[in-house]
Amino acid sequence: MSLAAAHFVSVTEVGTRIVVRTRIEGGVTDAVGYLRSRTDTECTVETKRGLVTLALADIVAAKQVPPPPAPRAPRRRLDD
């Protein structure tokens, strides 16, 4: 566990877009999304795939990230 990363999550305002790297069996994984809640032992991040609850003890890195890019305009056909 990274104390600095866990502290960052503990003091970051709910609603902030963050990335959290956690240790899993066989390596690490990232959750990118909006911090929705936190307790003394875990935090919940809303990702594209839904809510993910992460144990603060498993966090190895975390930081604030910018908003996602705007959706791209559809491509137009060349024969138009």
Image (tube, rainbow, N blue to C red):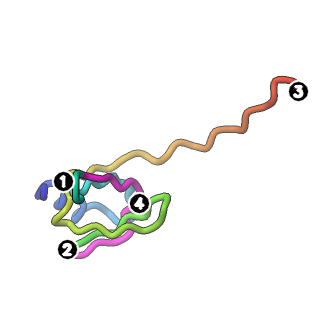
Amino acid bearing label 3: Asp
Residue corresponding to mark 2? 41
Question: Does the segment drawn in magenta span residue 35?
Answer: yes
| Dot label at residue 3 | none
- Closer-to-camera residue (28/20): 28
Element type where label 2 sits in the image: loop
Q: Report if residue 8 is visible in the image.
A: no
Q: Spatial distance from mark 4 to mark 2, Cα to Cα?
A: 18 Å
Sequence order check, earlier mark of 3 and 1 = 1
- Closer-to-camera residue (25/70): 25
| Dot label at residue 80 | 3
Sequence order check, earlier mark of 4 and 2 = 4
Q: Are marks 2 and 3 in contact (CB under 8 Å)?
A: no
Residue corresponding to mark 1? 60
Q: Position of residue 41 (x, y in %)?
A: 19, 74
Q: Spatial distance from mark 3 to mark 1, Cα to Cα?
A: 51 Å
Magenta stretch in the rendered image:
28-39
